[in-house]
Image: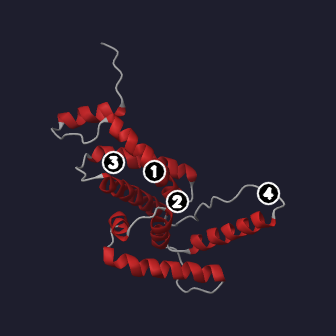
Amino acid sequence: MHDTTYTNVERLEAAAGELDVPFEMDEDAFRAFYDRTARPLWAYLARMTGDRQAADDLLQESFYRFLRARAAMDDEAHRRNYLFRIATNLARDGFRRRATSPDLVCAADESHGADVGAAARTERRADLHRALGRLKRRERELLWLAYAQGSTHQEIGETLGLKTGSIKPLLFRARKRLADMLRGTSVPGGDRA
């Protein structure tokens, strides 16, 4: 028996070779892709789950499933959308298992200085956190992908499994509900999905 150390990518390449399916990314390409996408994907998962540890686990599982899929991808945007789709499905599966959707994590300003502006920002963030937590899960996903990630309507549709034409009205309604909640207006149908 000889001592050989394999990287995870090499193991996946070997497994793909056994199945006669070419592996699409070499280790350097994967590392570069990971460096570009891991942080935004983790932030998305943390907002959707409300749990930083769950986001860590889902991030790892998303990349693992992405690598295992060995799907042919047209370009970087397609790979990114596919990865976010995997992560979205994993997060939704977790919601279904728990049968309730936890509140979002708000990255509130931790400083407690005497600055009145900082106190106002912290209060606004807390209000936003509460309002986002009252939105339906799909509304949170739409708003996060559109405004935090800067995804196009087509990318949002691909990630969430929705028709591109439905994204605009869904975003409009989600923004309106969020704005009504922030103004303190009662919004019917505030139950989380």
Q: Is mark 2 on a helix, strand or loop?
A: helix
Residue tagged 4: 112
User: Which mark is first along the chain, 3 or 1?
Assistant: 1
Image x and y of residue 155, in percent:
35, 65
- Residue 71 sits above or below residue 88 on the image: above
Q: Residue at x 52, y 78 (%)?
A: 175
Q: Which residue is drawn at 63% across and 71% down?
A: 128
CA neighbours of label 1 inside 10 A, class few (<14), some (14 to 19), many (20+): many
Is there a contact, CB below 8 Å, between mark 1 and mark 2? yes
Measure how far apart labels 4 and 3 are at the Cα level.
Answer: 41 Å
Measure how far apart labels 4 and 2 are at the Cα level.
Answer: 27 Å
Residue tagged 2: 49
Task: Between label 1 and label 3, give the one nearer the viewer.
Answer: 3
User: Which mark is first along the chain, 2 or 3?
Assistant: 2
Q: What amino acid is labelled 3 in the image?
A: Phe
Task: Between label 4 and label 3, give the one nearer the viewer.
Answer: 4
Image x and y of residue 44, in percent:
49, 58
Residue tagged 3: 66
Q: Can residue 190 be seen in this view?
A: no
- Quadrant where the image shows the N terminus: top left
Q: What amino acid is labelled 2 in the image?
A: Thr
Residue tagged 1: 58
Position of residue 20 in the picture relative to residue 66 (left or right): left
In the picture as drawn, the residue positioned furthest to the right comes out as: 114
